[in-house]
Image (cartoon, rainbow, N blue to C red):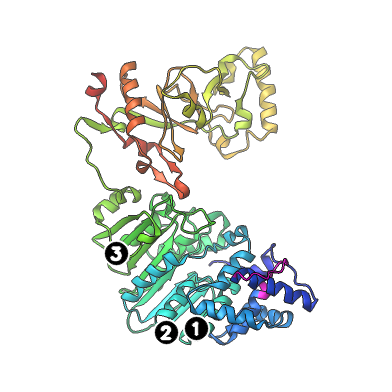
Amino acid sequence: MTELLDPVTANPDRSVVSANLATRVAEATALWHAVFGLTDSIPLVPTEDALLRVALDLGAARFGGPLSTQESELLSQAHSGMPTISWANDAARSAIVSGSDPLGDAFCALRSAAVRRHSGAVYTPSALVRPMVDWVLRQSPSRIVDAGAGSGRFTLEIARRNPKSSIIAVDSDPVATLMTRAGLAALNHKTATVLHADYTTLLLYPVRGKTAFIGNPPYVRHHALSAATKAWAQEAASRGNQTISGLAGLHAYFFLATSLIAKPGDIGCFVTSSEWLDVNYGSIIRSLLLDRLGGVAIQVVDPTVLPFGETATTATISCFQIGSRPKAIRLKMIKGLDEIQNLESGPPILRERLVETSRWSTLIRTAKETPSGYVELGELCRVHRGAVTGRNSVWVTDGNVHGLPESVLFPSVTKAKELFQAGAALSSVTNLRRVIDLPLDLDVFDSEVRREIERFLQLARRQGASDGYVARSRRAWWSVGLREPAPILATYMARRPPAFVRNLAEARHINIAHGLYPREQLPDSALDRLAHALSTTISTSQGRTYAGGLTKFEPREMERVPVPDLPLLLA
């Protein structure tokens, strides 16, 4: 199960509140001046105690059901350490009723982004909250579960729209659950339950009618999850006849938990980062949407849009109906947040197509028929990423290494900018660095050269070159294993289309570039035409796009790019 973090004691950025009452008043006043934009600001650092005192005064202790032990301790601490500030309470209540989230905004200002990332606390903007709530309420659920509620943005939007709605808001951060309780108090919403708990262990009592699950599951990468949490995921996946990668993040666990908590006929609407559409460890989400979760529609916000403000991440909204096992799922790309209206818009993509591809983002783009006379690049060339050195500081050098023979120093493309700067052709290796690539069998060298190589390898060992995963995975840790020169080299990650460069200098390349190797020998003129055709026709939409517009082409993705067929290249 997921660990319940105590962000108050674990937060290194949290100020220690002064014992002086006047200082406390000044700190609280500074906080609310900053939050509400008042002009008479006081240049003192606010604290979470001030935030929690406002939550207490709004009525956090009286709404949302029984408090957890940690919630009670936090409110007691705030009560004993901070005074009531009436104007701040009035301003907060007014803002909440009007549709704002002053407590959540203050929380995000108080707790650094780095600390919030540790627990996946990325709060959802109203431009995403409102259409998701629209979709859920149109389904007329009997109960709504806010999974990973944070400051209660989904919960409070539902409470404003439907004051009688039955809501369960769940979050593992007691500060977050107290903010949600305070928001409910400001709205005088009495039919919501707030749980300071781990969503993956949630048990729901049965109700008549459907339950709706809504939220922004926390994005916590796999290496920040405990062994116990990962063990839960493995066991939970097996219960549903699924498998889950150890690289999956916490947001994938929320989909998995929902599939176990919900009953057929329930619905869900989650917003997450978009990476699960394509990556291997997102396969658990894709599989669940095709099976028990019953995917209805997926809206992908254009990766160049940054919907979460300071957090550079993508956004995908997934709507699902548990138990429906869909024949098709609607997929749509949204160019801007103002376009998000009907979450079930977009063309239906048949189940068969979704099953047969591991990259769903490619299905969202408008499919174009391959023009007459064109084929996929993979029919003409194999695309291979360059070798991984494992430690560039050891194996990549700007000049000669004393004692090593020239035969093991290979001029190589080691930076993408070298290809961007080369233009149509790389004609010289003069400005390239060298990669040291020793053979597997060092006995091919005479004794004097062998002694120099051993001296170099001793130094490499001291620098850790023999200890890393890459080195341990090689047949011989000292042999990088560069590929033969590729006649065409290509960049594969940038905020622009790839560069395709004729490798006239016969340079080698490491893993910052791909090499295109013809399946049959082609004359230089055909290779020139191929590189030119790729450079002028490829677009970023054919690759995998990340937040901020960074586009990546894996080798197999590049092989799917249409290019002129062999007769046109040889003409």
Q: Are marks 1 and 3 in contact (CB under 8 Å)?
A: no
| Residue of label 2 | 163
Which residue range is magenta in the image?
37-50
Q: Is residue 472 above or below residue 232?
A: above
As helix, strand or loop, the secondary structure at mark 2 comes to loop
Residue type of the residue flagged with mark 3 = Glu
Quadrant containing the C terminus in the rendered view: top left
| Residue of label 1 | 187
Q: Position of residue 448 (x, y in %)?
A: 67, 12
Alpha carbon of mark 1 to alpha carbon of mark 3: how far?
A: 30 Å
Residue 69 in view here: no
- Asked which quadrant contains residue 174, the reply is bottom right
Q: Residues within 10 Å of mark 1 (few under 14, many from 20)?
A: some
Q: Is residue 84 above or below residue 329?
A: below
Foreground pick, 258 / 170: 170
User: Is label 1 or label 3 in front?
Assistant: 1
First along the sequence among labels 1 and 2: 2
Alpha carbon of mark 3 to alpha carbon of mark 2: how far?
A: 26 Å
As helix, strand or loop, the secondary structure at mark 1 comes to helix
Alpha carbon of mark 1 to alpha carbon of mark 2: how far?
A: 9 Å
As helix, strand or loop, the secondary structure at mark 3 comes to loop
| Residue of label 3 | 344
- Asked which quadrant contains residue 539, the reply is top left
Total residue callouts: 3
First along the sequence among labels 3 and 2: 2
Q: Residue at point 36% right, 54% down?
A: 335
Q: Residue at point 36% right, 82% down?
A: 142
Residue type of the residue flagged with mark 1 = Leu
